Image (tube, rainbow, N blue to C red):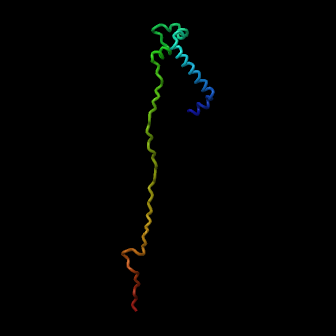
Amino acid sequence: MTQTLSWVVPGKAKRGHAALWLAVFLLLEAMEIFPALHLFIHSDADEPDHECAVTLFTHGQAHGADTAVPILRPEPAVVFNPSRPQVVFVSADVRQLPGRGPPSFPSFPS
């Protein structure tokens, strides 16, 4: 999705969009600090039941998005390893095993 958005919205437009929202946020903060500016924008800003973004910021009722990122444990990868018959090489010399005697030749009757 990020690739799609970066293709649709060029970098200059993204920066301009971010600058616009930064200006809106700073205007809200300025209206919070200077009540006369808030009264200039809203004629009923001095009434107790007035509610707008500035009063929400002033009373601490504006909540940002939850930025807690869930940490998920990755599942172990399942690797199929077919068992192969193991080949065992014997390093003993079979000609001289302990149970063998010298070769015998059959004696033929004469």
Closer to the camera, 79 or 10? 10
Image quarter of the C terminus = bottom left
The extreme bottom residue here reads 110
State how many labels appear: 0
* Residue 32 horizontal/vertical position (percent): 51, 14
State which quadrant residue 108 falls in.
bottom left
The residue depicted at 48 percent of the width and 10 percent of the height is 50
**52 relative to 17 in the view: left or right:** left
**10 relative to 82 in the view: left or right:** right
Q: Is residue 85 above or below residue 47?
A: below
Closer to the camera, 105 or 47? 47
The extreme front residue here reads 33
* Residue 57 horizontal/vertical position (percent): 48, 17
**70 relative to 8 in the view: left or right:** left
Q: Is residue 39 above or below residue 81?
A: above
* Residue 54 horizontal/vertical position (percent): 50, 15
* Residue 38 horizontal/vertical position (percent): 53, 11
The residue depicted at 56 percent of the width and 32 percent of the height is 2
Closer to the camera, 45 or 105? 45
The residue depicted at 61 percent of the width and 32 percent of the height is 7
The residue depicted at 48 percent of the width and 12 percent of the height is 51
Image quarter of the N terminus = top right
